Image (tube, helix red, strand yellow):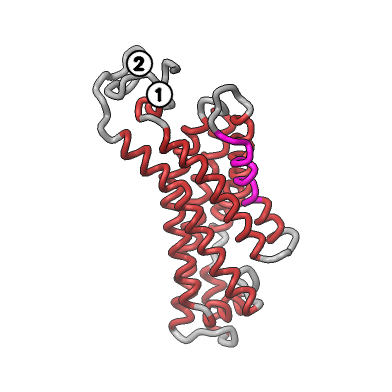
């Protein structure tokens, strides 16, 4: 048994100057983070599935001109509202859950895991903010505005502030590059002695940015993003299970 795993549960840290008083919230925070990690991606996966269904059925999207967005939102207001709420909830869950991935990987790939998790957290927070703007467009639709109404098109175009572009750009960096780095961190960690993370978990995590790239840049369709999300969910669940299997004392020592 390693010194780390044999540390008494009542000791927060054996480092000089650290408090010897146990933190009664350690176990709760570890379990909550482990549950939140796959939950956040599951919520994104549900959102992506809903979006794939309605966009495939209609041939419309919210990435085109304002008139197309109004037609899309007017045809599927409930689906768009549900997707927006799911994205916001997913962002909140991932803010709580991604630190669990960082702690699981920290003993074997500390720097790479940190470079992955920080932009992911920032990106998903920004994406939640961008998703909240959908309710403005839904309000225009609810007021009777449609793609053929000049006032509705003008109102939607006026609400599309360029200040949102940096937020969306940060989301793209965190969602694609951050997730790719997290997968690489898991693969690198699996090669270290004593690591408890299989290499294929990292490969599955990397399926998310690959699926999105095939959708956005190759134009192969939303279902590639859905498939990538399903695979990433499995990979993150492996990290979550490792977090659940880690002792509270070990969790604290990982910082």
Where does the C terminus fall, quadrant-wise? top left
Q: Which mark is residue 46?
A: none
Furthest-top residue in this view: 16
Where is residue 63 shown, x and y percent of the image? 63, 68
| Residue density around tag 1, few if under 14, some if 14–19, many if 20 or more, within 10 Å | some
Q: What residue is drawn where x is 37% and y is 27%?
A: 252
Please tell me in which quadrant of the rendered image residue 217 appears.
bottom right
9 or 12, which is in the foreground? Answer: 9
Q: Look at the numbered discs 1 and 2 and tell me whether their residues touch, using CB distance below 8 Å.
A: yes
Q: Which residues are magenta?
A: 197-209
The residue under label 1 is 253
Count of marks, rendered view: 2
178 or 158, which is in the foreground? Answer: 178
Q: Please say if 226 is above or below 12.
A: below
Q: What residue is drawn where x is 62% and y is 48%?
A: 176
- Residue 116 counted in the magenta span: no
- In primary-sequence order, the first of circles 1 and 2 is 2
Q: What residue is drawn where x is 42% and y is 50%?
A: 93
- Residue 207 counted in the magenta span: yes
Q: Please say if 178 is above or below 249.
A: below
Q: What residue is drawn where x is 48% and y is 60%?
A: 87
The residue under label 2 is 14
Where is residue 52 shown, x and y percent of the image? 60, 69
| Label 1 secondary element | helix
Where is residue 11 shown, x and y percent of the image? 29, 21
């Amino acid at each position: 048994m390693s010194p780390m795993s044999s540390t008494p549960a009542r000791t927060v840290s054996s480092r000089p100057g650290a408090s010897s008083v146990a933190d009664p919230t350690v176990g709760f925070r570890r379990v909550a983070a482990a549950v939140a990690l796959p939950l956040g991606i599951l919520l994104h996966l549900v959102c992506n599935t809903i979006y794939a269904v309605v966009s495939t059925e209609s041939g419309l999207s919210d990435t085109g001109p304002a008139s197309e967005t109004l037609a899309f939102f007017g045809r599927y207001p409930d689906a768009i509202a549900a997707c927006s709420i799911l994205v916001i909830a997913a962002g909140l869950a991932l803010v709580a859950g991604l630190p669990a991935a960082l702690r699981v990987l920290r003993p074997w790939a500390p720097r790479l895991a940190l470079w992955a998790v920080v932009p992911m957290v920032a990106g998903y927070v920004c994406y939640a903010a961008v998703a909240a703007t959908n309710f403005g467009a839904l309000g225009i639709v609810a007021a009777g505005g449609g793609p053929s109404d000049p006032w509705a098109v003008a109102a939607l175009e006026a609400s599309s502030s360029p200040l949102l572009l940096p937020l969306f750009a940060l989301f793209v960096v965190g969602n694609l590059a951050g997730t790719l780095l997290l997968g690489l961190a898991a693969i690198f960690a699996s090669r270290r002695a004593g690591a408890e993370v299989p290499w294929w978990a990292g490969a599955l995590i990397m399926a998310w940015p690959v699926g999105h790239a095939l959708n956005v840049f190759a134009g192969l369709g939303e279902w590639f993003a859905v498939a990538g999300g399903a695979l990433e969910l499995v990979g993150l669940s492996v990290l979550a299970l490792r977090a659940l299997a880690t002792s509270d004392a070990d969790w604290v020592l990982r910082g």
